[in-house]
Image (spheres, grey):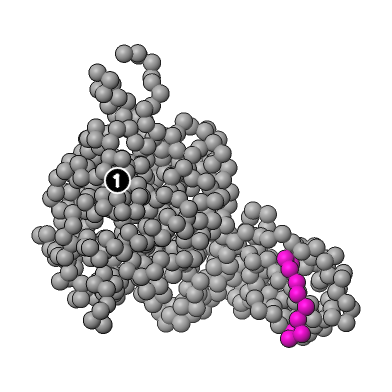
Amino acid sequence: MPADMSMLLELQIRFRRAILDGDTAEIVAAIQGDGLDPAARVGIYRNHAFGTLGDALQSTFPVVCRLVDKRFFAYAAHEYLREHPPHSRCLVEYGADFADFLARFTPCEGLPYLADVARFEWALNIAATVREATPLQAEALAAVPAEQAAYVALRLQPSLSYFASPWPIDTIWQANKEDEVPPIDLASGGTSLEIRRSEEAVAWRRLDQGIFAFRTALADGLVLAAAMAAATLRDPAFDLTSALQQVFAEGLAVAFCISRKREIPR
Amino acid sequence: MTKSRPIPSCSVGIGLRLPHVTEIAVTRPTIGFLEVHAENYMAETPALDRLLELRRDYPISLHGVALSLGSAEELDRCHLDRFKALIERVEPMRVSEHLAWSAIGGAYLNDLLPLPYTEESLDIFCDHVEEAQEALGRRLLIENPSAYLRYTQSPIPEAEFMAEVARRTGCGIVCDVNNIHVSAWNFGFDPIAYLDNLPIEAIGEIHLAGHHAAEDVDILIDDHGSRVAEPVWELYAAALRRFGPVPTLIEWDANLPALEVLLDEAHHAEELADARRYVDAA
């Protein structure tokens, strides 16, 4: 530590290490025993932090928890917490990279769909915690000169998520919300999902390949020409006019701009 | 003395927790105010809409748990901005935070961690209270923590530290009577002397909650998960004698009971405050 470092800062950095890593060696000398091992006193705070943050993850990822059982989930959450402590002080916003963590977490290798279930639950969480913006009306594009139409980029609802999986994730998720989990055919194929807040409820649906590719491209900030190209690759019969009408009819777009770079920053 | 039930001499509120929201919205029980944790309403959830509806009929006490005023680094301006935006929407009657720290180096540890009570901590804490009061446009009430450890280098008694923060920053104080009881038990100090060292004019809210005894060691743990314990009711009566009738909150966050139980606890607090009034009048 630098010599002029604040005593309080130094103490708090050591305390943080004791909580996240369980390494109390550098903090115990600063704590009065009062008839108890100082490390055990720090342990009370450590248990509280891991317990409550683990509970927060469990409430955001309930089906992941059910798939691996509570004890294993607590273990996975503990390892995740150490590597990725929360930044936001709103606990509903904790867990954005939990799915990526699970995908790399070798004890979970036997459940290849687990990370995608976590991605789905994170998308549900986004939809539950982000308000829909006022939809853009299709007429707003009427003023765009014809030669620039291909370079229109749409900004979509902030509650929207698109994700595809080689597993029937929505079926797995729904089945695990039941008391008795019905049999699931894991070989029934993948899913391409759209998740959003609709009215005040969270909703999701499967999209066909062309529409999914089109909307994913729009969500990524691609201009209409590029989104259409992506959609046509998946579905040679893709019809831009009707796809665009659907986007407006469903209130998915909230703003637009005209880009020469084929992309806009999100 | 009249036999009819008098108007309560102090306003008693309860914590608004999700499982009770519908029942409160439908039955509209008589409650002095509702308290909510600010961080639970910063995302755009349906719960925020429900709060804004209830807000029309009940005053709100907005209780922050994560501003980390005791961190030896800059306050999180993003969090302060969200706090301010929530204040503007909810228009709470009181806004409070804690004498504690919760985050360092970008990691939020989700607990009210204890500070060493030194001159350095006092300067940092007061600077942060002033910065927060300015950014939020509101006077803050600062709550005394419950603690399970104290530091070897912590020369200022906690109650004096609280009083000095109030004197320097103009903030008010949430006197959490359960926290005083828990810390007094854990560290063997006199809870009445603690009350006597808090400045009467700064006390803006009193908190009451449950605690439990740890299994293997002689430590009380503040858990907000049970009824207020008898010694805490006695300390509450002592607090009323010293501070007069102060708006009082029944806190319950874990093992949430039926709403009826919370209302029963609130009623008991009102009775104690009223009994105090008759003693004063006699």
**Residue found at x 68% / y 66%:** A157
Helix, strand or loop at mark 1 = strand
In this orientation, which residue lies closer to the viewer: A7 or B152?
A7
Picture residue at 27% right of the left edge, 40% below the top: B200
Quadrant where the N terminus of chain B lies?
top left
Q: Quadrant of the C terminus of chain B?
A: top left
Residue position marked by numbered label 1 in the rendering: B176
Instruction: Say whether residue A113 is left or right of residue B130.
Output: right
Residue A257 lies within the magenta run: yes
Q: Nearer the viewer, residue B228 or A114?
A: B228
Q: Which residues are magenta?
A: A252-262
Left or right: B267 in relation to B85: left
Specify whether residue B64 is painted magenta. Answer: no
Q: Residue furthest top?
A: B2
How many neighbours does mark 1 have within 10 angstroms: few (below 14), some (14-19), or many (20 or more)?
many
Query: Is A245 drawn above or below residue B184 in the view shown?
Result: below
